[in-house]
Image (cartoon, grey):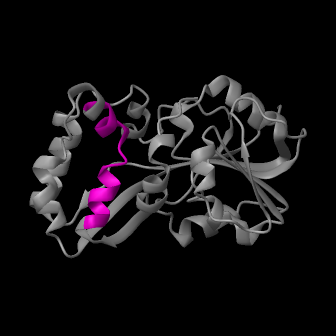
Amino acid sequence: MKDLFSEQSELYQQARPSYPKLMIEALLAQIKTRVHAWDCGAGSGQLTQLLAPYFQDVIATDLSQNQLDQAPRFANVQYLQQAAEHTTFPNQYFDFITVAQAIHWFDFEKFYAEVKRTLKPDGIFAVIGYGLLQLEDIELNQKVIQLYTETLNGFWDAERSYIDEHYQSIPFPFDEIIMPSFQIELAWTGQQLWDYLNTWSAIKHYQKQLNLNPLDRLKQIILSQHTINVSFPILLRVGRLRTLK
């Protein structure tokens, strides 16, 4: 698993979008018992905090202790620094295992072995993420698309392609549950959009290699915005352990 976000843990916690309640409710409807949940690759707890009210206990893990230190605290949530592929959890322990906006960094085979080992026989596993944002402002949206596809071409890690393919190309060795489509819808200020774009891993790679921030040419137009309607398509793969037939 790669750790690309420790250096910007505080910005990541503040700037990354959260997930809609309707998606959480749809996932909960699939889960028979709500005792133990594992949020893997939890980062600074964007999804963890949404799960906390519904389970007796939630364990959130991440490779980055800096990220976990930014997460909100709850009485029933433990934050543990552990790699996704090697954990200390008991067999058949979790009712629900999820990984949000992180699975593309994992060793799929090793991580899935841990999921299959620690998930209860009737438990649910969910891969969650979000794709490229879309802005209601057509002109600004085109500039962001150009930044993403042209300016940053060659600076994205290879794993980013899994997000561009909406997680449909990841291996998924589970009995899949067909879920509704969801999206994140937000009204951001220009500053919020600026902060979010500055969390992109490709921006960091560009800065380190060329000693320039490719966002600077968009800074004035972005920060002058009062309200920007933003949406993200949600990527969702949900399944159960495969049963032998």
Residue 97 appears in the rendering: yes
Depth order, front residue of 239/56: 56
Res 179 quadrant in image: bottom right
In the displayed structure image, the side of residue 99 where residue 188 appears, left or right: left
Region in magenta: 191-206
Residue 120 rendering spot, x and y as whole percentages = 85, 46
In the displayed structure image, the side of residue 237 where residue 225 appears, left or right: left
Question: Mostly what secondary structure, the magenta segment?
Answer: helix
In this picture, is 217 found above or below 26? above
Res 195 quadrant in image: bottom left
Residue 41 appears in the rendering: no
Res 210 quadrant in image: top left
In the displayed structure image, the side of residue 2 where residue 53 appears, left or right: right
The residue under the point 66% across, 49% down is 98
Is 198 magenta? The answer is yes
Depth order, front residue of 124/130: 130
Residue 67 rendering spot, x and y as whole percentages = 57, 48
Residue 55 rendering spot, x and y as whole percentages = 79, 65
